[in-house]
Image: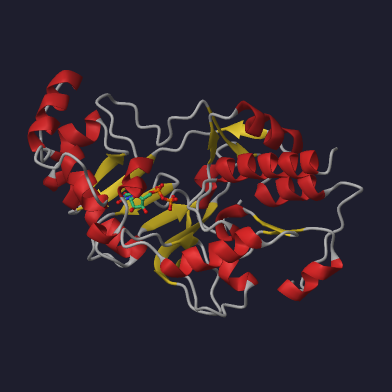
Amino acid sequence: MVHVYGPHIFHTDDDEVWAFVNRFMKFMPYVNRVKATTGGKVYSLPINLHTINQFFDQALSPKEAEDFIKGQADSTITDPANFEEQALAFIGRPLYEAFFRGYTVKQWGVDPTQLPASILKRLPVRFNYNDNYFFHRHQGMPEEGYTKMVEGILDHPSIEVILGSGLTRADADRFDHLFWSGPVDGFYDYDQGRLPYRTLDFEKFTGEGDVQGCAVMNYTDESVPYTRITEHKHFSPWESHGGSVCYREFSRACGESDIPYYPVHLTSGNELLNAYQDRAKAERRVTFVGRLGTYRYMDMDVTIRAALDCGRSFLAGLGG
Ligand code: UDP
């Protein structure tokens, strides 16, 4: 199983979303444990007691580590206004510079002072040895992959799938209602300009046996041009493979013919986004959904929750 759009680990606290995806695919137990290489050494992510003890060459207990990190944190920042301030107020400069600054500059292409604090809040800091990347109760990998899972969702007598044909705003007239999951600016033919997105390039390489020893290794130094290396076979430990497929992942500004992956939200706000979203809100027969349609940095489970809610409220509006 190769995650051709980058590593996707399904995780959620939402029981209904978990039950929904399990209707279409068996999920195998999987816990995401990420490692990070910085300054020529390997550490455990998210930042946890092991990371702290290794990084500072200590043998601190949870309580001692918490006090120690409080001492590192910048207590003068009481209301963090951006990613960098949030990190400095939370963990202090040495950990920020080793694990967050370089990765974030590479991932988003801007200085972390221009990014909202909410991006950092995706990542926990733990004062114990729990290195599970996610807090959620449900976590797993689709046994036969996401493509099969989506095929299962689409396998319904009322659903017709038409591929390779494109869809434009003009097509909306052919339908009672259109749910648009493409880019919101794309719906309007980019007539007011293009919203910023990040796209990803993957450089594939192969090896034999175990190439890096884990599924995802982040490279958090700015001097390394890629953000992470994924060794895909570790996502399906229940399978056995002699060879191995790996992807080096590079992030860059999304051009006109690239696939948009991440909407870019800056602290300075986005007049263009407001303009498109005002138009989108005024549409009566079109609903904008998904990461691109709503221009939000949503995980898979949040996207599915939003889709279920959207479908329900649409049907309720029809009286059905
Ligand atoms: N991040 C970081 N260092 C890391 C991992 C993440 O600085 O080693 C920051 C970075 O800004 C990234 C954000 O945290 O964009 C969210 O990380 P996550 O792993 O959730 O990203 P995703 O898998 O969605 O690309």
Colour scheme employed for the rendering of this structure: secondary structure
- Whether residue 154 can be seen here: yes
Q: Residue 20 or 280: which is nearer the viewer? A: 280
Q: State the residue at coordinates (19%, 48%).
A: 85
Give the left or right position of residue 294, taking residue 310 as reference. left
The structure residue drawn at horizontal position 31% and vertical position 58%, both measured from the top left corner, is: 267
Compared with residue 192, is residue 176 higher up or lower down, i.e. above or below?
Answer: above
Residue found 51% across the figure and 68% down from its top: 275
**Relative image position of residue 140 (x, y in whole percent):** 57, 35
Question: Residue extending furthest right?
Answer: 157
Location of residue 25 in the rendering, given as x and y in whole percent from the top left corner: 72, 38
Please say whether residue 196 is visible from this viewpoint.
Answer: no
Residue at the far front: name it: 282
Query: Left of 307 or right of it: where is 257?
Result: left
**Between 191 and 53, which is closer to the camera in this rendering?**
191
Give how far across and how far down residue 164 sits, in percent.
76, 72
Q: Nearer the viewer, residue 6 or 260?
A: 260
- Front position in the image: 189 or 103: 189
Residue 15 in the image: above or below residue 300: above
- Horizontal and vertical percent position of residue 231: 47, 52
Asked if residue 139 lies left or right of residue 98, the reply is right
Who's the residue at 38% across and 42% down the image? Answer: 122
Query: Which quarter shows the C terminus?
Result: top right
Establish if 239 lies above or below 70.
below
- The answer to which image quadrant residue 318 occupies is top right
- How many marks can you see? 0
Q: Is residue 179 above or below residue 312?
A: below
